[in-house]
Amino acid sequence: MAAALSAGGAPLAGTVEEAVARQVCKRAAIKAGQVLAQTEMEELVRALEQCASPRTCPHGRPTMIHLSVEQLAREFGR
């Protein structure tokens, strides 16, 4: 991205702001197995609610999934 911008070009897709968001989300992401405090989890949900596109990350990956009551019961063996 930096090379394209310094050469007078533009990022491959979207705006510079979108390209930066894609890079930042990689570094700021919660990693698998990372333990969070209750307050950290609550803040993440509040921040997600404020997003313009809360259903996906800047890369287009889903941030949430919908589970029916039946699916949830199956997951917990009830």
Image (tube, rainbow, N blue to C red):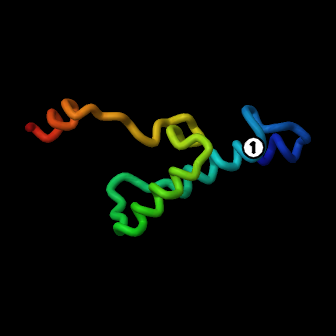
Tell me which amino acid carries mark 1.
Met
Q: Residue furthest right?
A: 8
Q: Is residue 8 left or right of residue 13?
A: right
Question: Foreground: 15 or 2?
Answer: 15
Compared to 42, does 6 lie above or below?
above
Task: Give the residue drawn at x 14%, y 41%.
Answer: 76
x 62%, y 53%: residue: 24
Residue 20, given in percent of the width and then of the height, sits at 70, 49
Quadrant in the picture for residue 74 = top left
Q: Could you say which quadrant of the image residue 42 lies in?
A: bottom left
The relative height of residue 51 versus residue 73 in the rendered view (above or below) is below
Is 43 on the left-hand or right-hand side of 7? left
Label 1, on which residue? Answer: 1
Residue 1 position, x and y percent, is 75, 43
Query: Residue 19: x percent and y percent?
Result: 70, 43
Q: Quadrant of the C terminus?
A: top left
Q: Residue at x 55, y 56 (%)?
A: 27
